[in-house]
Image (cartoon, rainbow, N blue to C red):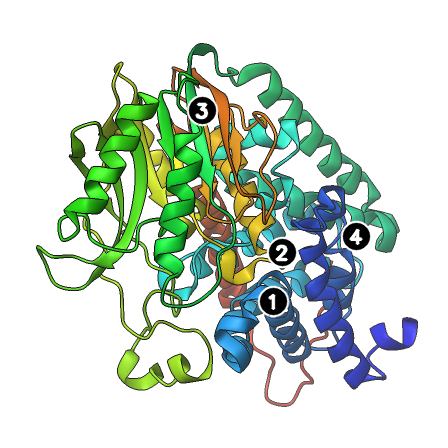
Amino acid sequence: MVAVLDGRFPGRRAAAAAAAGALPALAFPAPALWWFGYVALVPWLLLLRSAPSGRRAALEGWLGGAAFIVAVHHWLLPSLHVFLVPLAALLGLLWIPWALLVRELLGGAPSAGRAGAALVLVPAGWLLSELVRSWQGLGGPWGLLGASQWQVPPALRLASVGGAWLVGLVVVAVNCAVVLLVAVPGARAPAVAGVAGCAVLTGAVWLWAPAPEVSGRLRVAVVQPGPVPDGPDAAALRFAAGERLTGSLAGRLVDLVVWGESSVGEDLAARPDLARRLASLSAQVGAPLLVNVDARRSDRPGIHKSAVLVGPGGPTGDRYDKMRLVPFGEYVPARSLLGWAASVGRAAGEDRVPGGAPVVMDLPGGARLGPLVCFESAFPDMSRRLVRDGAALLVAQSATSTFQDSWAPAQHASLAALRAAETGRPVVHATLTGISAVHGPAGERVGAALPTSASTAEVYGVPLAGGTTPYVRFGDWPVAAALAALAAYCAVAGARSLRKPAPGPSSPPARTTRG
């Protein structure tokens, strides 16, 4: 290990960087080793701080970042095939500034001041890479490090204050403190202070941030039809399974029935027979149905994915068209250049058409629901917007059947806990083939999740809550704080470089130390 760190074996260092970058994936579902997230970055940080040059640190940051993307998204291989590798290589570039920051602040024998700055700036640098790749065109905010803590109540309380961003900052800060403890004896005091600060912050938030107060309940039924054979009749078989399972809910006094993404394969306006069957089901169970239509619209061009509310009288007019589409899965970016991806993997043969605005739907009894479709549940700003618009219940309709036996279903279902904790509103995550799950307004699990391959309809007593979380009120303030800290650091570093006198023409350059 010492030989690798001192730079004598650059090939081994490159391999170690890739392996170290992939390690944090174990903190996410399906392994879900949430505790590992607090030390998962330590090997990578140790490698970067010992890089013999800035160029080497940049290379190892890039390799580690690319490996992290592949590890967290490896289940995309059936869809993207080899295209996942150049995509990961592109996104891996985002970790180069972070790697240089790690070497600068943690390298050598940092002073107490530099170590203290590292506890703030290294997490901020990591957040910057997450922020850039969270753009929908680059794949969206899937695999944010803070999302690995979805089942930890204190972390969920932090999310109610600053979203998954704040949780991620704390996780990286703890990793940074561990590095100072094990590798820099002279910096143990700031390291201990950093860990204590994270603990104090978490404790203060736990005591100060108001826990959601339950103000009522809705009985929500999740219909999960389970796998159906591929082929031209798949949509009809899926509809029939959902119809049968929904019929079994008659007499169970439900307030809402939720079907998964793409549960209806034809436009209801063009198929009034399907609309009548859904209306009959609504009358039979005594509750509206929220279905998801994945079809070419009869009233406008293109294929849309739409959450549609259907009552006893048919579609109510409440309709939400999915706004943020999955790159390659639902559209191909720059199709004229990258359209070949559709012939290599399972990329979309035709681009879906995005919707224009979020929609909040009214339910009988006065409750309002905010629909999300598929990976829109990964975007904190979308659920926050729906709650600010009045949603008391968030419903995410999803389908991960393409990735049935991978980590994808568990990763996707875990996001519901974060969105619930951030907004103080319950989230129903309904899928075609699992994992379907329900989380209460504090992010807590409600009832049992429906595993993959289960074919069933389950009724959940979903607690409703009022009030407004700090995250809903103030938004992504941790992002602004992190960017401000990085800007201040860059300004100070730039000012110092301008004040430093240039070496004379006949004198050797001054030796500098990072202290």
Specify few, some or many for label 2: CA neighbours under 10 Å numbering under 14, 14-19, or 20 or more.
Answer: some
* Residue type at numbered disc 3: Gly
Which circle marks residue 179 in the picture? Answer: 4
First reached walking from the N terminus: tag 1 or tag 4: 1
Specify few, some or many for label 1: CA neighbours under 10 Å numbering under 14, 14-19, or 20 or more.
Answer: some
* Residue type at numbered disc 4: Val
Is the N terminus in the top left, top right, bottom left or bottom right quadrant?
bottom right
* Residue type at numbered disc 2: Trp
Measured in 3D between alpha carbons, the distance from the residue under mark 3 to the one under mark 4, in whole angstroms, is 35 Å
Does residue 221 appear left or right of residue 29 in this picture?
left
Q: Which residue is mark 1?
A: 74
Measured in 3D between alpha carbons, the distance from the residue under mark 2 to the one under mark 3, in whole angstroms, is 27 Å
- Whether the residues at callouts 4 and 2 have beta carbons within 8 Å, the answer is no
* Residue type at numbered disc 1: His
Give the number of the mark in front: 3 or 1.
1
First reached walking from the N terminus: tag 2 or tag 3: 2
Residue at the image position 75 percent from the left and 69 percent from the top: 19
Element carrying mark 4: helix
Residue 12 location (% of width, % of height): 81, 81
